[in-house]
Amino acid sequence: MPKKYLPLIGAISWLIISIILLTLPGTAFPTEDWLDKIWFDKWVHIGMFGIMVLLWCVALRSLIASTSLTIIKKTFLIIAFACLAYGILMEFVQLYFVAHRSFDYGDIIADAVGCALGWVFSTRKYIKK
């Protein structure tokens, strides 16, 4: 396998991990009060979606390395919005298909923050001016 495809394996793996985590029943998570007080769930969403955007940006950057910077910038932005759309979709999946899970606007906001942070980091780190 060519080296340029290795980052794609990481991005796909992280997507699979996120699907598993987001579709676990609500009873699989601890119900500690102190975790609610520090908004632990929201920090997890920020981290999970920030990493997802970063991994997909790295993967697609390695695949389209010889493309113009304008196209790469647009691609990174599309990745961020696609990851946010995935987060919103998963909230509906949790609402309708996962036991003891619900739709949470706070999770969507946290997903958006994570996507934005992942996009900013990826743009600054992986697009050479």
Image: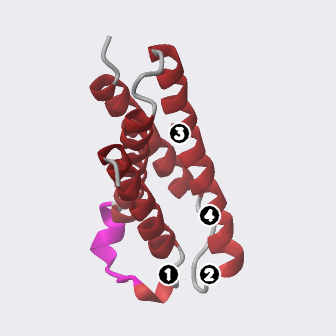
Kindly give the residue lying farthest to the top in the view shown. Answer: 129
Residue type beneath disc 2: Val
Q: Which residue is mark 2?
A: 98
The answer to whether residue 86 is magenta is no
For the point 49% across and 50% down, the residue is 111
Out of 26 and 125, give the one closest to the viewer.
125
Q: Quadrant of the N terminus?
A: bottom left
Q: Which residue is mark 3?
A: 79
Q: Give the side of residue 79 with respect to residue 124, left or right.
A: right
Out of 6 and 107, give the one closest to the viewer.
6
Alpha carbons under labels 3 and 4: distance apart: 19 Å
Residue type beneath disc 3: Ile
Tell me which segment is drawn in magenta: 29-38
Residue 91 marker: 4
Q: Position of residue 38 (x, y in %)?
A: 30, 61
Marks 3, 4: nearer the viewer: 3
Q: Count residues near mark 2 (Cα–Cα under 10 Å), then give few for <14, some for 14-19, many for 20+.
A: some
Among numbered discs 1 and 2, the one appearing first in the sequence: 1
Q: Give the side of residue 61 with respect to residue 19, left or right.
A: left
Q: Position of residue 42 (x, y in %)?
A: 41, 58
Alpha carbons under labels 3 and 1: distance apart: 25 Å
Which image quadrant is residue 124 in?
top left
Alpha carbons under labels 3 and 2: distance apart: 26 Å
Among numbered discs 1 and 4, the one appearing first in the sequence: 1
Asked which secondary structure carries label 3, the reply is helix
**CB contact under 8 Å: marks 3 and 2:** no
Residue type beneath disc 1: Leu
Q: Which residue is mark 1?
A: 24
Q: Count residues near mark 3 (Cα–Cα under 10 Å), then give few for <14, some for 14-19, many for 20+.
A: many
Asked which secondary structure carries label 4, the reply is helix
